[in-house]
Amino acid sequence: MDNGVSSYRRFLKGDEEGFVEIVRDYKDGLILYLNGFVKNISVAEELTEDTFVKLGIKNRI
């Protein structure tokens, strides 16, 4: 397992499927991690979404 490195590299090269794989593989864990801080699953889900949106935007500029 490469911890998403190959998916991220493909995404940086323009392969949208790489981004889909990153979201699929890390979404649930990130939600649970953030929920540990904010103690609100809805807020944790929103923060997770914001995180992936920023990741996608940052790497498209």
Image: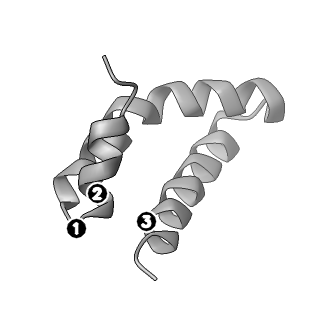
Nearer mark to the viewer, of 2 and 3: 2
Dot placed on the residue nearer the N-terminal end, 2 or 3: 2
The x and y percentages for residue 59 are: 45, 69
Q: Amino acid at mark 3?
A: Gly
The x and y percentages for residue 24 are: 31, 37
Name the one closer to the observer, 18 or 31: 18
Q: Are marks 1 and 3 in contact (CB under 8 Å)?
A: no
| 29 relative to 27, above or below | above
Nearer mark to the viewer, of 1 and 3: 1
The residue that label 2 is drawn on is 11
Q: Residue at x 40, y 25 (%)?
A: 3
Name the one closer to the observer, 40 or 50: 50
Q: CA distance from mark 1 to mark 3?
A: 11 Å
Residue 36 in the figure: left or right of residue 20: right
- Element on which disc 1 rests: loop
Q: Amino acid at mark 1?
A: Gly
Q: Are marks 2 and 1 in contact (CB under 8 Å)?
A: yes
Q: Residue at x 23, y 52 (%)?
A: 10
Residue 34 in the figure: left or right of residue 49: right
Q: Quadrant of residue 11?
A: bottom left
The residue that label 3 is drawn on is 56
Q: Residue at x 66, y 26 (%)?
A: 33
The residue that label 1 is drawn on is 14
CA neighbours of label 2 inside 10 A, class few (<14), some (14 to 19), many (20+): many
